[in-house]
Amino acid sequence: MNHLPILMVTIPLLAAPACLLLGHRRVVYVFALLVSWITFAISLFQLGHVLQTGKISYHIGNWAPPYGIEFVADTLSAFVAMFVSGMGALVLAYAPRLLEVEIPASRQHYFCSLYLTCLTGLLGITLTGDLFNVFVFLEISSLSTYALISLGRDRRAVLAALQYLFIGTIGATFFLIGVGLLYQVTGTLNMNDIASRLVESEGVNGQGIIVLPATRTLRVALAFMTVGLAIKMAVFPVHKWLPNAYSYAPNIVTCFLAATASKVAVYALIRLIFGVFTIEFSFDLLPMRYELILLSFLGIFIASLTAIFQNNVKKILAYSSVAQLGYMVLGVNLINVMGLSSAIVHMFNHAVIKAALFMVRKCHGRRSPGPCRVWG
């Protein structure tokens, strides 16, 4: 059971290049589908084990943290890994008819390889206990996402992928700078070890509340990582890449990204605020709570209003996703049990419902390979 977290990452990681070696598109698809369902089955065993016995910790190479890389499955990470792998399996099971229409036969084995690579990155972000590896898996998922979006038959798919590449690279750079600054202060990259070292240097303020030292380096580190994750989440106003990426990517890619990618970024933000830094530091000494709440409200209203004036169904759903992400970030920033629980539940609800909405293919009474438009 202790090997379950690493198996969830290594199985799709090793299967991705195998798709290129197999070559035949039908064999590759069946192989990728089998791998995705095996990964989902492992996630169910992992979640059940965590709920019964507690956290699972796997040390790569038998090197104990903080010197070695650790994979951790607790209740939250096991739950997120479960619905990410589950949606990956369900969406891929839905794919055959769309693949025939949207992606040339000669490139379908590339699609399966990139799909499993993206799934690997998302699961790695969820299960790793090392902050630098969050960045590594973030880039693995992002690079494969850029390629998946560009597979669309519409010429605008390549432009949308390029736009996402530029904006996503900025977000990844911000996150990496924050990781470097945090390493400068703590001398470690393991998230639990960072949290413990910051707690060791706590001070007591005038009101008797224990808080982390309000050093400039820590403030800048948290600010950079928050901005980087906000770009990956597509929080208003750094959401401009999402509508085009969802609209012009192949429909199967849109289903997968809408169900998983932004939710994993929200999870990373929750883990960063509540697992590495403390509530007092994040929301008192660095008062980003009010800024994020304001951006959440703006995103909810502006994105919803923008969706009303769209005549492309995929763009309507894309702007709706921006608004729903505002609800999730708002729940996180309420900094109470109800708000955080609501954000986590909404992550799951939105993953299932939005993927199902993107799977709807009928418009004007027929199946269409291109973007559907609103009736009338």
Image (spheres, rainbow, N blue to C red):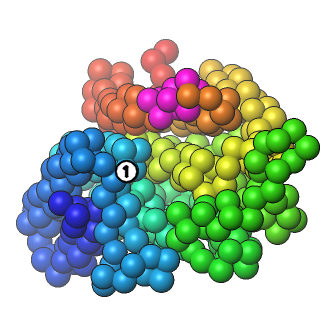
Q: Secondary structure at mark 1?
A: loop
Magenta span: chief secondary structure: helix
The residue segment tinted magenta is 338-346
Q: Quadrant of residue 225?
A: bottom right
Q: Which residue is mark 1?
A: 74
Q: Is residue 340 magenta?
A: yes
Give the residue displayed 17% in from the left and 49% down from the top. Answer: 45
Give the position of the N terminus as an image quadrant: bottom left
Check disc 1 and give the amino acid type. Asp
Examine the rendered structure and indicate whether residue 234 appears above or below residue 362.
Answer: below
Q: Is residue 277 magenta?
A: no
Would residue 84 be visible to someone looking at this image? no
Give the residue displayed 61% in from the left and 61% down from the top. Answer: 195
Q: Residue furthest top?
A: 376
The front one of 3 and 309 is: 3
Give the residue displayed 55% in from the left and 32% down from the top. Answer: 340
Position in image of residue 249 (x %, y %) = 44, 51
Position in image of residue 363 (x %, y %) = 35, 25
Q: Residue furthest right?
A: 206
Position in image of residue 283 (x %, y %) = 77, 42
Give the residue displayed 37% in from the left and 66% down from the top. Answer: 71
